[in-house]
Amino acid sequence: MIKKYVNQMKLSLTVVAGILMVIQLYMAFYYAPTEKFMGHIQRIMYFHVPSAFVAFAAFAIVFAAGLMYLYTKNKKWDYLALSSAEIGVVFTTFVLISGSLWARPVWNAWWVWDDPRLVTSLIMWFIYVAYLMIRTSVQGEERYRKFSAIFGIIGFIDVPLVYFSVKWWRTIHPKVIDKEGVHMPPEMAQTLFFSIFAFLFLFVTLLLYRYVLEDQREKIKELKK
């Protein structure tokens, strides 16, 4: 009964996520106007920024699931943390790559080491790659689940640093949204906010698939014991 319910949920989420992503692509390439100074390269924003929000959400789940695992010792929370961390690393990788592709023609540099957001984002990527490596390097099932949960909780410290870096320190990253409002045409803002929503929905869908896979993998492993 539960399996049937989960399969129905996976199918529903996949269909809705697919529709949202098609709409997102249309808005990013046809609805949003071309930026006056950067040209079409600015359209990377509709993929770069939403991917960053997915990474933040993914690592927030790693943080919360890690706390729940330490409190309950229920492996389900560990499965959730692992699944979310893997997806977060993939999207953070895309953030770093798309950011460099955007920076090269606009800043005339692939990477700027004295920009706080770039550096803290790279550190965030290293933290969660290390989180995944801990799970394969620490011996003992309970130990690696415990260590990775603690690491995921401590590592989350960097996530708010990434988010607030453009507010706390001098940076060459543009501040398109601040307390005074959204500094872009309405069509661009609508496209950006819809892209964030679509990407977060896609993340939830991917997370469900990955969680179910991890749950099934662990069940098979226990049957083999």
Image (cartoon, helix red, strand yellow):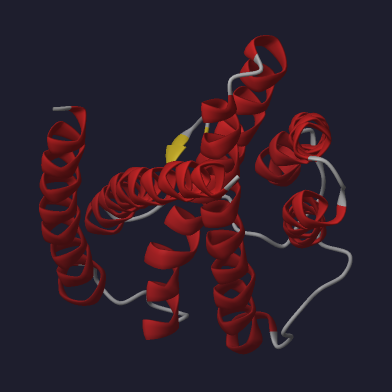
Q: Is residue 40 above or below residue 44?
A: below
x, y (%) of residue 56? 57, 42
Front position in the image: 35 or 168: 168
Dividing the picture into quarters, in which one does residue 154 lie? top right
Q: Residue at x 34, y 53 (%)?
A: 199
x, y (%) of residue 90? 55, 64
In the picture provided, is 154 more to the left or to the right than 60? right
- Answer yes or no: is residue 176 visible: no
In the picture provided, is 32 more to the left or to the right than 204? left
x, y (%) of residue 106? 60, 82
Q: Is residue 125 above or below residue 43?
A: above
Q: Residue at x 47, y 49 (%)?
A: 220
Location of the N terminus (image quadrant): top left
Labels in figure, total: 0
Q: Is residue 159 above or below residue 44?
A: above
> Residue lying farthest top?
71
Location of the C terminus (image quadrant): top right
Front position in the image: 98 or 55: 55
- Answer yes or no: is residue 151 visible: yes
x, y (%) of residue 131? 76, 49
Q: Residue at x 40, y 51 (%)?
A: 213
Q: Residue at x 34, y 50 (%)?
A: 209
In the picture provided, is 114 more to the left or to the right than 43? right
Q: Is residue 164 above or below residue 123?
A: above
